[in-house]
């Protein structure tokens, strides 16, 4: 089963991407090795990425993972 | 729509077409209508959706997760169909003290294949829609 949407898990991928000289979803997808549709699902909060993918995304933006993904205290 | 979602739609549509063809042909051809299940052979062309184009990623971890779920559901449904069918045939043959006609077994196998691909396609389509298709 695809990972269930984690309650309280948010990310700022869209903000970081647009701030990075207008990087497109396809650009980011190519850099982290996924399809554009997965980036769309991530930005929409509909998909919880694997740890590896989360680390790759954080590396692309040069940020710590917990700055890209935030988990609210529950 | 990414490549694996196209594959899921193709599985669903080809399977629905095959089942519809069989259903329409039964009144005229009887058991010969099983030939309609041959349309499932077109599923072989779904590999065309997975051709590598440039350096683009064709499938990723999200596709793998969805396909794993869809395959699990479809295998379960197909095995259930097959085993329940065989069980019913065994009970029938035992009560009637008769042999099971080969054509009935052939129908059962074809139907199981149709269930396998139909459920896999349907589950794939639903999961892609639920997990934000684009």
Image (cartoon, coloured by chain):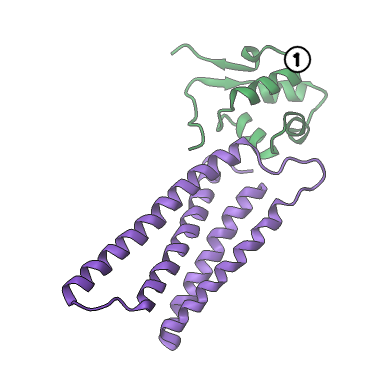
Question: Residue A57: x percent and y percent?
Answer: 69, 23
Q: Tell me which chain appears green.
A: A
Crowding near pointer 1: few (<14 within 10 Å), some, many (20+)? few
Residue A64 located left or right of residue B96: right
Question: Residue A30: x percent and y percent?
Answer: 76, 34
Question: Residue B115: x percent and y percent?
Answer: 44, 61
Kindly identify which residue carries mark 1. A62
Q: Toward the viewer: B56 or B91? A: B91
Residue A58 in view, yes or no: yes
Q: Tell me which chain appears purple.
A: B
Q: Toward the viewer: B115 or A49? A: B115
Q: Farthest residue to the bottom: give it.
A: B28
**Is residue B24 depicted above or below B46 in this figure?**
below
Q: Secondary structure at mark 1?
A: loop
Q: Quadrant of residue A42?
A: top right
Residue B132 in view, yes or no: no
User: Residue at 67% across / 23% down in the picture?
Assistant: A13
User: Residue at 53% across / 49% down in the picture?
Assistant: B124
**Is residue B110 depicted above or below B60 in this figure?**
below
Residue B18 located left or right of residue B26: right
User: Residue at 31% across / 64% down in the picture?
Assistant: B86
């Amino acid at each position: 089963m695809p990972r269930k949407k984690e309650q309280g898990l948010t990310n700022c991928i869209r903000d970081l991407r647009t701030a990075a000289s207008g990087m497109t979803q396809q650009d980011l997808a190519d850099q982290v090795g996924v399809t554009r549709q997965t980036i769309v699902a991530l930005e929409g909060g509909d998909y919880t990425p694997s740890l590896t993918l989360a680390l790759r995304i954080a590396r692309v933006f040069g940020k710590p993972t917990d700055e890209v993904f935030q988990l609210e205290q529950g | 729509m990414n490549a694996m979602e196209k594959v899921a739609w193709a599985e669903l549509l080809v399977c629905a077409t095959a089942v519809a063809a069989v259903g329409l042909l039964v009144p005229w051809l009887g058991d010969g209508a099983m030939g309609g299940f041959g349309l499932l052979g077109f599923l072989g062309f779904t590999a065309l959706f997975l051709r590598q184009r440039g350096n683009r990623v064709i499938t990723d971890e999200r596709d793998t997760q969805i396909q794993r779920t869809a395959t699990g559901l479809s295998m379960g449904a197909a095995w259930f169909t097959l085993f329940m069918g065989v069980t019913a045939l065994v009970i029938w043959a035992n009560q009637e003290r008769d042999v099971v006609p080969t054509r009935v077994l052939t129908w059962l196998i074809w139907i199981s294949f149709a269930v396998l691909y139909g459920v896999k396609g349907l589950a794939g389509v639903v999961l892609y829609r639920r997990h934000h298709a684009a």
